[in-house]
Structures are given as C-alpha cells and as structure tokens.
C-alpha cells in the first residue's frame, strides 16, 4: 500500500515562512498578555469523554475526535454502543480543560487567577477559509473575579495585541446573555425555547432581519416573531455593559471600536453574562470571542466560581497577515556560506569559525555544500531571506 504524502483533510503542514510568522505573533501575544499579569499554563490535549460530553460545548460536542479505549479495556466483541469503546477525546477548546485544571489545582493558585493558555485543539468540522480541523487557540481567562473589570481588562489586552499586529479598524461587539433571555421572555417565548430562538438570531448577519422573522414565524408564530424584533429595536446596554464599555472607551487604542450588538449570541451554552466578539474590516467573520461562564467550574467542584475568558482567532489572524504580505520586523541579518566540496579540514575549520563569530554577533548563518546549479541554490537562499551569500572555493 502506497503511503500518502498529503496531510489528513482539515489539517495542514506549516512551511518555514509561515512558521516564522506564527512564532513572531505568539511572541507578541505572550509579551502583551504577560504584561497584563497573565500566567502561562498547559493542559493535556486529551480529556475525559465525560467532560467533553457534559452539554456545555454546544455544537462542538458533535465534532469531537473520540479516542478508543486501549488494551484489555477495548472489548469490541461485546460493545453495544459507542460509549462502550471510548473513554476520552481530543479537546475541542481550551475553556473546558482550564475549568478542570482550576478545579484540580485551585488550592495551589492565586485568587483571582489570570491564565494564559496557547495550544492546539481539534474539531471534526467542515474545513473552509481560515478554519481547520486542527488549529491553535490563544486564550486568556480570569478565574475567581466576579466584577466586570475582568471583562474590561480582557478586552483591552486583546485590543493591544491586534493594534501591535497592525490591524487598523477593528470592532469588539458586546452583549449579555441575560439581555438575550430578557428579550426572549418579553416576546413571550418559553425558557425551553430560548436555545432555538438564539440559534435563529445568530443567523442575522447571514439571512438578515426578514430572514430571522420568517424562521421564527415558521418555528413559533408571526406574533412572537414580530414582538421579538420590536423588543430588539428597544434594546439598550444593560447589566454590566455600560461600565465595561466606559472603561474600554477610556483606555482602548485609537483603531479599536467597541459597540453594543443585541443580536450577538455566541454558540457556547456555558456563557452566563457578558459576551463579546472581534471583527476586522478585512475579514467577513469573527476573529475572536469569549464571555463570562460562571457556572462551568462549579460542575467540577460543586461550588460556583466566577470566570470569564477571551480567545483570539490565531489561525485567522495568521491567514490575514500572510494575505497582506506582512513581514516580521527586526529579523536578524541572514548570511549563507556556500562551500565547494573537497575543502581541507583546516579550511573548513576557518569557515566554521567565521560562521560562529557572526552568530555570536547576532546574525543567522547557514553553511551549505555548494550545488552544481549554484544560481538556483542562491535564488532559493535569497527567497528564504539570506541577504548575503559568500562562496568558498578550493585552493
């Protein structure tokens, strides 16, 4: 059987140029988040299947890459359901693993705890522009703080990151899940209908106001649908939103805007208060989002712990930077030494000593054996950013 050289569908190989950009962006993110007092942590890629299927991840629970039991625990001959053969899965986000992590280590952590977590997550989703089945998430969360100053700090930190990455003109939209429920109740929907109502509302940017009214009419009644839209027309920021928006407006970068959006839903069912998303002018979809999830940690411990987090869309940020031809600033000078075959030990020692001296001064130096097609070799090196190419011939 022939081996397959392409990656699995929805995954991707990362070439050196993109890898350099990813490392630069993660450096910016870590530097700014650390300056805000966030501490880096790491959680396992694999989580207990019970945690992943705890009805907190919304549609993501349908996209889990599940892992078979191992060894004697895997009994395919007697298995009747999928639950009989699986006991774990790849994490679909970083929030649920963080909640388990905090529940397990709360006694060893400060209060409040400001966590920075970056790592791969997996969803068996349909691949499309800026969306993969394996992708990197970059999260900051504040655990143990109920005051809305936590939301303001998360928003300001993310705004500083986007500004540092030269995004000019981006909007952070904000809403509150409690306002969404209040509006649904005002329109006469039963609480059991809320999730269905919110799923339709979340399509506003795709199907428009008339489309939302039509879908709600089909699901419920025209009277409720029209009453719901009328309630939205009267919507104003409530609960903690005015204070959050005031703090952010006073301190945000000039190229950042914050706006109340009563139609913002966010897909995760674990959100309990303020929610937010980032949109940038050059991309028609969200490049990050988050919100308050005060009920999640309590499912592990039995005691409620206030929590709020924000995740930047790392893969989409990288994609947008690459599309605009972004160049990593301040890169070290790169020099290539091309050495003809047959050099003596003494000659090679002198060449390697020269390369070591340049590296000690901060340069990047690549020593390579000279190829027959030197012109093509030099063109390749130039494409990799080597601005100086020195050739060493025998004799």
Image (cartoon, helix red, strand yellow):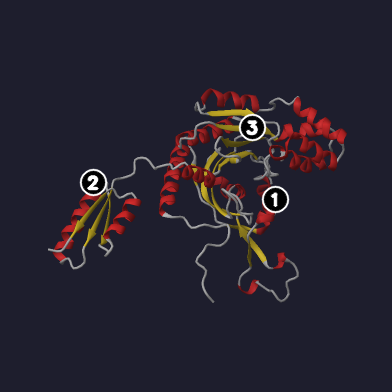
Label ID, residue 59: 1
- Specify the quadrant that holds the N terminus: bottom right
Give percent across and percent down for residue 380.
33, 55
Give percent across and percent down for residue 125.
64, 54
Residue at mark 2 to residue at mark 3: CA–CA distance: 48 Å
Query: Taking 148 as reference, is 391 above or below it?
Result: below
- Do labels 3 and 1 touch, CB within 8 Å? no
Query: Which residue sits at x=76%, y=24%?
Result: 234
- Do labels 1 and 2 touch, CB within 8 Å? no
Label ID, residue 361: 2
Label ID, residue 174: 3
Q: Is residue 345 visible?
A: yes
Sequence order check: which comes first, mark 1 or mark 2?
1
Determine whether, in the image, residue 304 is placed left or right of residue 378.
right
Give percent across and percent down for residue 114.
53, 39
Determine whether, in the image, residue 86 is placed left or right of residue 328.
right
Q: Residues within 10 Å of mark 1 (few under 14, many from 20)?
A: few
Determine whether, in the image, residue 280 is placed left or right of residue 181.
left
Give percent across and percent down for residue 143.
58, 40
Query: Taking 125 as reference, is 286 above or below it?
Result: above
Sequence order check: which comes first, mark 2 or mark 3?
3
Task: Check disc 2 and report its element: helix, strand or loop.
Answer: loop
Seen as rendered, the residue at the extreme left is 395
- Specify the quadrant that holds the C terminus: bottom left
């Amino acid at each position: 059987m022939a081996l397959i050289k392409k990656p699995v569908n929805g995954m991707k190989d990362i070439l050196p140029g993109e890898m350099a950009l990813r490392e630069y962006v993660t450096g910016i993110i870590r530097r700014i988040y650390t300056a805000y007092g966030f501490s880096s942590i790491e959680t396992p890629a694999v989580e207990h299947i019970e945690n992943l299927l705890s009805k907190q991840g919304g549609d993501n629970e349908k996209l889990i890459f599940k892992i078979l039991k191992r060894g004697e625990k895997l009994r395919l001959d007697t298995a009747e359901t999928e639950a009989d053969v699986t006991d774990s899965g790849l994490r679909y986000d970083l929030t649920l693993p963080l909640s388990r992590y905090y529940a397990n280590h709360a006694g060893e952590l400060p209060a409040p705890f400001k966590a920075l977590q970056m790592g791969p997550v997996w969803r068996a989703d349909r691949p499309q522009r800026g969306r993969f089945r394996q992708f990197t998430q970059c999260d900051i969360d504040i655990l143990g703080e109920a005051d809305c100053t936590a939301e303001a700090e998360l928003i300001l930190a993310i705004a500083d990151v986007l500004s540092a990455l030269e995004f000019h003109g981006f909007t952070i939209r904000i809403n509150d899940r409690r306002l969404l429920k209040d509006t649904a109740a005002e329109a006469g929907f039963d609480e059991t209908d809320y999730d269905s109502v919110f799923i339709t509302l979340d399509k506003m940017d795709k199907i428009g106001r008339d489309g939302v009214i039509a879908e709600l009419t089909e699901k419920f009644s025209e009277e409720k649908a029209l009453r719901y839209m009328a309630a939205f027309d009267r919507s104003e920021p409530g609960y903690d939103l005015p204070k959050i928006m005031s703090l952010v407006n006073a301190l945000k970068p000039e190229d950042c805007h914050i706006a109340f959006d009563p139609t913002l839903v966010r897909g995760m069912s674990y959100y309990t208060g303020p929610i937010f998303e980032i949109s940038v002018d050059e991309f028609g979809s969200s490049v990050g989002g988050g919100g308050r999830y005060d009920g999640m940690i309590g499912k592990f411990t039995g005691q409620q712990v206030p929590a709020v987090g924000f995740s930047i869309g790392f893969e989409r940020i990288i994609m947008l930077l690459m599309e605009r031809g972004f160049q990593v600033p301040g890169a070290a000078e790169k020099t290539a030494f091309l050495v003809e075959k047959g050099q003596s030990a003494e000659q090679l020692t002198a060449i390697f000593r020269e390369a070591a001296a340049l590296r000690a001064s901060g340069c990047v130096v690549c020593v390579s054996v000279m190829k027959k097609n030197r012109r093509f070799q030099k063109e390749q090196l130039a494409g990799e950013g080597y601005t100086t190419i020195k050739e060493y011939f025998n004799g």
